[in-house]
Amino acid sequence: MEVTTLESVWQLTMNSEKMFPEKALLYIGSESYEAPTITVLQGLSDLGFSVFTIGKPNINSWFCNKVVKYNAVASLRFDFVLSDLHWGTQWDYYETLNFGSHPKVLIDGDDNPGGIGWREKHARYSQRYRKRPGRKVLEQEIQPYQWMEPLGSYEPDIVFVSQKNLGDEQSCYMPFGIHREYLELASNKTTTDRGVDFAAISGPGPKRGELGAFMAQDKLPGSVFSGAIRGQGVIAEPLRQKLVSDRRVHSYHRWIMFRDYFRLLNDTKVLIYPGVHASAWWDAKRPWEAYASGCLVMLDKPLVDMSSYPVTELCPFAVYESYEELTQKCYYLYKHQNILDGYRREVIKGALKYFGSVPLARRFLWLIAQGVS
């Protein structure tokens, strides 16, 4: 039996945490929700890593961070420094603190409608957001507005990108992956217990709009759902206590799980996921929420470069390149429920094995060790 890329990487990166003697990192993070960073930090936390933040907790590491004072950083023992791209990253720490030979790791999980790189994104955000505030504001756990500061001399040793451009030979692909919160809302229904055959959930982005227009033509068989759905919101209590209801500066809203939305996913056999934009902007929370909920996910062929760790390997049949192909495959699955059931169960098994927080954290560590050795 042929060994897939996913399986090869999974085997290769097993126990990669042993390559990092301190089992600790310093996190100089964005003040915005960063999906792939959260996945990695959840996995590292489960692997026993300490995650240090300076002066205050961070939205992405609230569940595991150990807050240290600025003047205590010099005495810390850690393996690498991690940052992410969006607003609020205090890049000046890289100049005012002496990190010596510690590898500098960057995760770029940001939207990519224009097919640009992380430096161009930083420049674009710098035009969009306000300038960095004074130290008194920076020390507040909840910031009053979104802000940016110059990169200065910052130069990462390794860059992880979720919306990876084709032809980008410098960055490492990093999928969003499955957050533990998604699994907590899974009901583990069997295929026959699921009442919705095919679902397409609307959302921002032109690709979702195109799929919605296709679904409105009523071409798919069986019980079909197409549209928006949310319901009552659920959020972890530590975040609920910090939630600012009249503004979304820190993207706390992205942590909210909506009950009716997850009930639909838990009752769906096949979720159709079209991506977001007709460029290198494919990844989002939705496919991973669907895998966690037990759906077979039909994927519009991704336009991001995920060749190093392709989710499409979970089920090559479940990849389509046109609505005609999607229609044909949906009819085939509807007529052959036993095959649908086999695909669904195998896909969920593989999604948890390869795209859970721990395996993604191990792959992350292995690539750091290889990239900066």
Image (spheres, grey):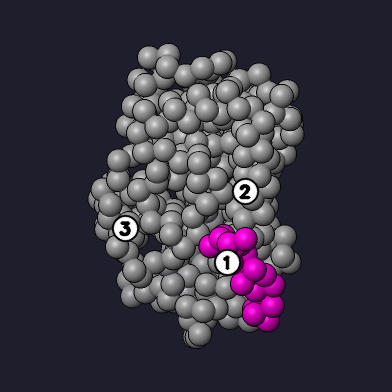
Is residue 354 a member of the stretch shown in magenta? no
Please say whether residue 306 is visible from this viewpoint. Answer: yes
Residue that appears at 27% across and 55% down: 116
Q: Is residue 304 above or below residue 169?
A: above
Q: In the rendered structure, which amino acid carries the disc numbered 2?
A: Ala
Closer-to-camera residue (266/261): 266
Quick one: SS at disc 3? loop
Asked if the residue at tag 2 contacts the one at tag 3, i.e. Cβ–Cβ closer than 8 Å, the answer is: no
Which segment is the magenta one?
1-25
Asked if the residue at tag 1 contacts the one at tag 2, i.e. Cβ–Cβ closer than 8 Å, the answer is: no
Q: In the rendered structure, which amino acid carries the disc numbered 3?
A: Leu
Please say whether residue 255 is visible from this viewpoint. Answer: no
Give the labeled residue for mark 1: 9
Give the labeled residue for mark 2: 351
Q: Position of residue 5 (x, y in %)?
A: 53, 62
Q: Position of residue 22 (x, y in %)?
A: 68, 79
Mark 1 surroundings within 10 Å by alpha-carbon count, few (fewer than 14), some (14 through 19), many (20 or more): some
Give the labeled residue for mark 3: 166
Mark 2 surroundings within 10 Å by alpha-carbon count, few (fewer than 14), some (14 through 19), many (20 or more): some
Quick one: SS at disc 1? helix
Residue that appears at 72% across and 39% down: 184
Mark positioned earlier in the residue sequence (1 or 3): 1
Instruction: Tell me the CA gap for discs 2 and 1.
Output: 14 Å
Closer-to-camera residue (265/24): 265
Which of the 4 quarters of the picture holds residue 14? bottom right
